[in-house]
Amino acid sequence: MTTTLDVARANPNAPLIDAQAQFAAPKAQLVGLDRLELMEALASVGVPQKQQRMRSRQLWNWLYVRGVRDFADMTNIAKDLREKLDAAFSVARPQVVAEQISEDGTAKWLMRFPAASPTEQPVDVETVYIPESDRGTLCVSSQVGCTLTCTFCHTGTQKLVRNLTADEILAQILVARDRLGDWPDQETPAGMTAPQDGGRAISNVVMMGMGEPLYNFDNVKKALLIASDGEGISLSKRRITLSTSGVVPMIQRCGAEIGVMLAISLHAVRDDLRNKLVPLNKKYPIAELLEACRTYPGVSNAKRITFEYVMLKGVNDSLADAKELVRLLKGIPAKINLIPFNPWPGTRYECSDWDQIERFADVVNRAGYASPVRTPRGRDILAACGQLKSESERVPAWKKRAMAAALGEVDTASPEDAAQEDAAHAG
Ligand code: SAH
Ligand code: SF4
């Protein structure tokens, strides 16, 4: 059974409002500011320099330890300062347009972020929560749409609308904690499933929602450093995983500057096939990608890189592929994650037969990689990997051409040229 609760009055299918006609600049968010910026915000409302550090600590605690959404609840801050802050800044959450709960406990939220300028539209973003017995994983989006055109991915059919800001990335975590009762002294609300180990509802975060996180590096970095800050949300960096389709030049910086776990969307063991599935491979081929993994800062047997491999029937699922996968990864501290392909309306791919996935997994197992198959979750609410796609934008013609070209159907400009062009427009 799937229940769908509309937790806001808005209709998720309603067209986005005419931004130009109704635009009211949103107040600046305090969520997403680093500690220095928070002190500057306090200075801007007249807090004397000698109090700024202490006040910024208080704010940090209210925002990230207590999860307050209203300045009025910040009871250890004087009323007149709360009023000044309230006049200039916001700590409010985005609108939750829809909430869906799968029969397996997976939850999906559609959040709407306001336009930042009169020429923009508000954007809709999907965030997914996957409860298991010993952990709860939140799958967070980094962009609305994606510039890349992986041919098996639903998000890949969508234009990049824009990068999400650090506060919008963090807001996905904060909203999920609200809905799951994951703040101190709260209980899991009826209808929600949480891990059974008594730990926090959200113990893990994966940057595996919409978008390519390494193409939005600065905002993702800022958000993840706040999420892992020990005096705030306090998620261990070992429990945060950033998944990339292989933006090689940014991989080193990801390790050195963010320090989270890395997942690589490999999906093919030969360049000719990977060029089709993940067209970014034409720019950064497999050998270069694996070299960046070998030298990933902090990589070790205790801190392995996850290699994701989507199982596509008759495309990349032969036993020869499995053997080559094991051979390619030799020498890299690795985990292998076989993802049954999640179909979406209009896709031309099929998921490999279960027997074939098991045979493939056996080869991988025998090479010493444990439990490599990821159980699909939330399929009834289209919440599984690669099924997220907001309705903010329809597919542009160039992107349809680029995807068809990647599949070898038409001869046209390279998909990355088109993607770069799009990124330039978006940026
Ligand atoms: N852009 C990043 C992160 C988002 S996608 C990346 O590509 O890694 C998260 C994972 O879901 C990636 O491994 C992606 O390849 C995989 N994925 C995309 N579409 C999928 C689908 N339809 N079925 C299964 N996995 C999919
Ligand atoms: Fe973008 Fe990742 Fe989907 Fe590729 S798999 S189109 S990089 S979101």
Image (cartoon, rainbow, N blue to C red):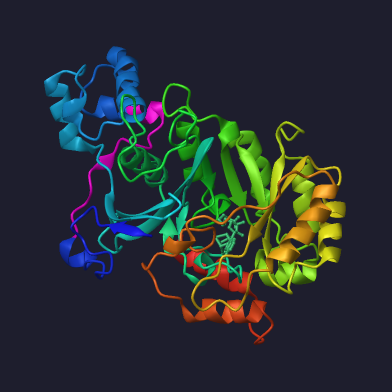
Left or right: where 73 falls relative to 162: left
Left or right: where 307 falls relative to 426: right
Which secondary structure dominates the residues rendered in magenta?
A: loop
Q: Quadrant of ligand 2?
A: bottom right
Q: Position of residue 49 (x, y in %)?
A: 30, 16
Residue farthest bottom in this picture = 410
Q: Position of residue 330 (x, y in %)?
A: 86, 47
> What residue lies at 54% left-to-right and 45% top-to-bottom?
206
> What residue lies at 50% left-to-right and 33% top-to-bottom?
225
Q: How many marks?
A: 0
> What residue lies at 31% left-to-right and 31% top-to-bottom?
67
Q: Position of residue 200 (x, y in %)?
A: 44, 31
Q: Nearer the viewer, residue 190 or 149?
A: 190
Displayed quadrant of residue 271: bottom right
Residue farthest top in this picture = 50
Q: Tell me if residue 30 comes above or below residue 334 in the rendering.
A: above
Residue farthest front in this picture = 1
> What residue lies at 25% left-to-right and 57% top-to-bottom?
6
Q: Nearer the viewer, residue 119 or 157?
A: 157
Residue 388 in sight from this viewpoint: no
Magenta span contains residue 28:
yes
Displayed quadrant of residue 112: bottom left
Q: Tell me if residue 81 comes above or below residue 337 in the rendering.
A: above
Left or right: where 161 falls relative to 241: left
Q: Tell me if residue 394 comes above or below residue 324 in the rendering.
A: below
**Looking at the rendering, in which quadrant would you find the N terminus?**
bottom left
Q: Point out the stretch of residues depicted in magenta.
A: 23-38
Magenta span contains residue 414:
no
Displayed quadrant of residue 389: bottom left
Residue 12 in sight from this viewpoint: yes
Q: Position of residue 294 (x, y in %)?
A: 79, 42
